[in-house]
Amino acid sequence: MTAIAGIIYFDKKPVDPGVLERMKNILEPYGRDAQHIWKEPGAGVLRMLSRITPEDAMDEQPLISADGNRVVVFDGRIDNRDELADKLDITPRQSRIMADSAFALKAFERWDNACLDYLLGDFAFAVWNRQSRRLFLARDPLGLRPLYWHKTNRFFAFATLSKGLFAIPDVPRQLCEARMADYLALLPMKGPESFYQDIYRIEPGHFLILENGSVRTHRYHAFDPEHRIHLKNDDDYVAAARELLDKAVFCRLRSTGGVASHLSSGLDSSTVTATAARLLETQGKRLTAFTSVPREGFDGPVPKGRHGDEGPPAAALAAKFSNIDHILFRPENRTPVDGLHEKVETLDRAPLNLCNHVWIEGIQADAARRGARVLLTGQMGNMTISYDGRPRLPNLLRRGQFLEWLKEVHAMALHTDTRLRGAMMQSLGPFLPVPFWRAFNAWKGRGSGSLHDYTAIHPDLINRTHLHDRACQAGWDLSYRPWADGWRMRTAVIYRMDPGDYLSACVGGDGIEMRDPTSDLRLLTYCLAIPEDQYFKNGQSRRLLHRLIGHILPPEILQAKTKGLQAVDWYEGATAGRDEIKAWLDRLESTTEVPRYLDLKRMRTLVENWPQKGWAQDNIVKTYRLCLLRGLSVGAFIHYVEGGNR
């Protein structure tokens, strides 16, 4: 992980060293191992480095091209170094002493903007052309490294996080009302707007060019809905997926320290952990796997269809590998609101799920104490290797393949736990009018299907920002009917949240880098392109993963009848933090901006009418875990922003 920043003055005004120093100080927690500044009349760039990979020891940024004309600052990891070396005529001996940033510079020197077609990995970088005074900024296709910018008629500035830009006195620190409304409603992040007015993000898969004072942005990567892969037989699909998964995991094992992984009782983290353990074993290395479990002795209610203790299934997987050290993490009296201000400041945004932050931060801290620098996840697995393929049912209906649909529905009812009614709702749900779908959910006890079921957004904010119209423009169904198009559903989820800030915060907090092999671009592209029946056929969902790694996963995971629920004891922590929640509401009610965004009266009522039981009920979970705690998180962020540009 590296934090980068820079400022360009259009009139070649000398850069104030104090501004660069302030930017460095603000971003230094995200790159504690080395900080360097480069400047010339009218321009200055800087980078703050955390040494995560062995090659980071050779990092000497900011880099200057051989002709002295280009200056590069790079944040990221290049996963196809060997392939690039062949294309760039770099010998193995040269490659061994080159940091990933040097590969990015060589690629840009060879291909200019088109270098993005050759780079694979998580990255954001800037290239300053001293002669033409042209600035190039880019992010990887999935946006796994963040990059923000601000422009006036006098200067242009960029930084890994928005907070780096606020080191410049002339940059305003004001909220973008529409983006905040989108976030509260969980709408996809579309467009360059950030949470701040006049602060913009480079969108995933985009690059920006600043030239002659003008800004142009271009999208260089988008998944192609017409791209299809057809192989000879089912076994070939599995073999290709296995090869891509191995590559995705292997290239994410580079680390100056140990490698750790999240290990729940779910299919994705189990698959990533098992694959990583197998690959590390060939190198004589160990893997530390962490499982979040409830407090010792927890016997509280668990929602229907879920199990709260993921320890035993995870232990069954870990026992299959002699090089896995399995660690159980328990919350130990932590509350979701502990250190909320610090969380917001580190993330530079509102945490999305305060309950999950308890165990995520705890595991990160423990992994760092044990010497790990890399923590593997499987967050994108549901869209790739373990995609269930159920949208195939309504798609068959839409295409008029009624006999095939009837065969699949019959097989589901015969061979799985899915009842006929469930199969019918999966099939017909996408085509039901919204009022009918909401009535069905209300009948099932799942709420009214409105925004207010899961968000504390103020009704006036919905109207001011035309939120329902914005949802339609974004192609997002606020009633959450099932999808009829699996490709559209998966790509919508892939781009729904911009993950860069969260991943940067991990390094800023504990110096550990989160890596997700299931978000590997090669694997994603493949999984989006193969036929839907590779995921769902003969009534069996997730059939690709079952064939891919079913011979390794234990029955406790592969044949589980219930789904794991992390932080099942979340309400105990929330109850213990009730006084702090009240104190936060007191603070928020005294501010100018928060009441414009949040329904504080409703939030106060929820706290005063704290439930004594029923914590496994869907409506209570949505009301308190999502509406109240997420509202409190957003309120804390607004409170943080109201502090001004300090």
Image (cartoon, rainbow, N blue to C red):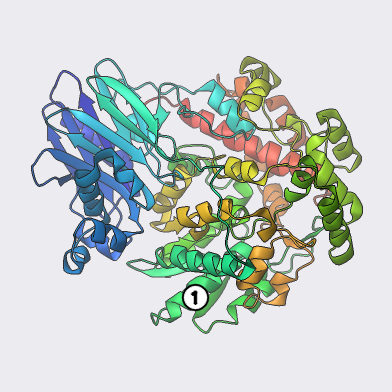
Residue 216 in the image: state x and y as whole percent: 34, 25
Residue 590 in the image: state x and y as whole percent: 58, 23
Vertical placement of 619 versus 436: above or below?
below
Q: Residue at left 49%, top 44%?
A: 499
Check disc 1 and report the residue beneath it: 277
Vertical placement of 629 versus 94: above or below?
above
Vertical placement of 129 versus 122: above or below?
above
Q: Residue at left 82%, top 51%?
A: 405
- If the image is split into quadrants, where does the C terminus sit? top left
**Is residue 203 visible in this depiction of the protein?**
yes
* Horizontal relation, residue 135 to residue 340: left or right: left
Query: Which structural element holds mark 1?
Result: helix
**Is residue 646 visible in this depiction of the protein?**
no
Three-letter code, disc 1? Ala
In depth, the one of 623 and 151 nearer the eye is 151
Residue 55 in the image: state x and y as whole percent: 26, 62
Vertical placement of 302 versus 192: above or below?
below
* Horizontal relation, residue 446 to residue 1: left or right: right
Q: Residue at left 54%, top 27%?
A: 179
